[in-house]
Amino acid sequence: MTAGSSQQSIRVAIIGAGPAGFYAANHLLSQSDLDIEVDMFDRLPTPFGLVRHGVAPDHPKIKNVTKVFDKTAQNHKFRFFGNVTCGEHLKPADLRQYYHQIIYTVGAQTDRRLNIPGEDLAGSHSATEFVAWYNGHPYYRDLEFDLTQENVAIVGMGNVAIDVARILCRTVDELRETDIADYALDQLAASKVKNVVMLGRRGPAQAAFTLPELKELNKLHGAQCRTLPQEAALDDLSKADLEAHPDASVQQKVQLIQEYASAPEAGMPRKLTIRFLVSPTEIIETNGRVGAIKIVHNKLTKSDDGSLRPRATDISETLDCGLVFRSVGYQGVPLEGVPFHSKWAVIPNQKGRVVDDEKVVHVGEYCAGWIKRGPSGLIGTNKGDAIETVECMIEDIRAGKTLKPAHPTAEEAEKFIHERQPAFFSYDHWRTLDEHELNLGKQHGRPRVKLTTIESMLDALSE
C-alpha cells in the first residue's frame, strides 16, 4: 500500500496551533493530488497561539486572521487535539509510530535575558509574562505585577515593548473596549502607573518598532508620548547610513520621533518617554525589590560588516522605577528527542527539514515558524515560511522519504491520544468555547470575555 494513495493517507502531525501551524495545515490540505490528513496538537485547549495570547487586545483587526485558520479547520481531513503537551502526554518517539510526517511549529516560548545584576529582583519581569497575563493565558493568569508603582521601565524597542507601554498607559475605558482578561482589566483599572520609560540601546533610525505602532502612541486618551531632543536627533553615522540606503518608513519614524521631542506639554495624567542610545547595566534594589535602574549612554560605531552598533560611553544615570519589563526578544526552547541549536535557540534545519549536528536530515521531521527561523517577522511572515517547509514535505512524499509508522490510521492515533490525555479538546470544543466567550462579551458590552482557566473551559463545555 503506497502512502499518499487512496488506499493509505499520508498522516501528518503538527505540533503547535499558532499561525505557522495553520498555514502549514492549509497548504498540506490544498494538495489535490495527494491524500493527506492533518492532526494538530497544542498544549493549550484553545488554538491560534500568539494570535490569541500574544496580539495586543487593542489590536482586534490583527486577530481577524483566525477566520482564515477557521476555514482550514473545517476541512474534514483536519483534527485538533488541544490540552495535549508534546513531551508530556506525547513524545516525538510516540508520534513516529502514528504519523508519516511531523512538523514542529511550537514558536519561541520563553524570553531572552538582560544578564545584568538585579534582573531577578521582585518587580523585574519579562514582557512575555506580562503579555500572556493580560491576554488571559492559563499558564500565566496567576502572575502578580505590582501596579501600585508610579514609575515603570521597559527595556527594548520592538513592537512588543510598545504593546506593553501602550497597555500600561491606556485608560480603563479604552481597555474595556477590548478582550483583555477580566482580572487584568480590574488590576489595570486600579493602576497607579504615571511614568513609563522605554529604553533602546541604539538610535531612532535603528528602532525595531514599526511606523503604525509608533503613530498609535500619539492617540492615547490619557497619556502623552515624548522623546528627548538630544536623543531624537540623528548622529552623523545614522544620517550617512540613511542617505546611502534611503528608507521611507525609517525616515517617517525618525520624523515622528523628532515631533514627539518638540511637542508641548499636554497635561496628560500619564507620560510615556522613549529613550534612545541607552543600555541598562544594573537593576538596583530597594527594600528587597526593584527600586531603580542604572543606564549607560551609548554612541553608535560602524562595525566591520557596515552595521551600526552601540558602544558604551562613560556617561551613566539612574532612573527611579518600581517595575522593569525586559522586552529584548523571544527564544525557543528544546523538545525532548528533537535536535536543537542552543546558541540560536531554534531547531536546526534545511528549508524546514530537521537536521542533526552533523547536518544529517531526520526523515519525516520538519519545522516552521519561529522555532525554524527565530523570533522575527509578523504573523503573515509565517505563511511563506510554512509553505517553504510544506513544499519540502511534499517533495519527500513523492520521493517516498517518509516515516514508516506501525499504526498509520486516524482511529489508532485517536485511541492512543485518548489513552494518554483523555481530557483533550477537539476543534468542536473550541467552537463551543468561542461562542460562549462571544456571548459573555455581549452580556458585558465587550467584544469577548475570555475563559482563562482550563477548569472554566471544561465547565463551559458541560453546560
Image (spheres, helix red, strand yellow):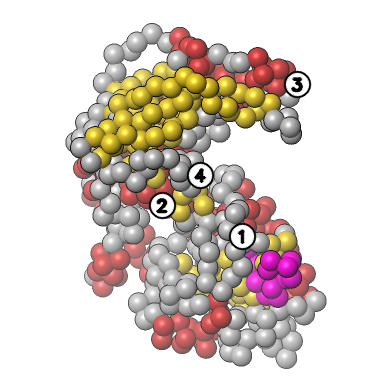
Please tell me which of labels 4 and 2 falls first in the chain.
Answer: 2
* 279 on left or right of 3: left
Count of marks, rendered view: 4
Q: CA distance from mark 3 to mark 4?
A: 28 Å
> Which three-letter amino acid code belongs to the residue tagged 2?
His
- Using the image, determine if residue 397 lies above or below residue 374: below
Dot 1: what SS? loop
Mark on residue 329? Answer: 4
Q: Residues within 10 Å of mark 3 (few under 14, many from 20)?
A: few
* 402 on left or right of 51: right
Mark on residue 244? Answer: 3
Locate the C terminus and report the quarter of the image it occupies: bottom left
Q: CA distance from mark 1 to mark 3?
A: 35 Å
**Residue 5: percent from the left, percent from the top?**
72, 83
What is the magenta range? 356-369
**Residue 458: percent from the left, percent from the top?**
28, 70
- Closer to viewer: mark 1 or mark 2: 1
Please tell me which of labels 3 and 4 falls first in the chain.
Answer: 3
Please tell me which of labels 3 and 2 falls first in the chain.
Answer: 2
Please tell me which of labels 1 and 3 falls first in the chain.
Answer: 3
Q: CA distance from mark 4 to mark 1?
A: 17 Å
Dot 2: what SS? helix
Q: CA distance from mark 4 to mark 2?
A: 16 Å
Mark on residue 53? Answer: 2
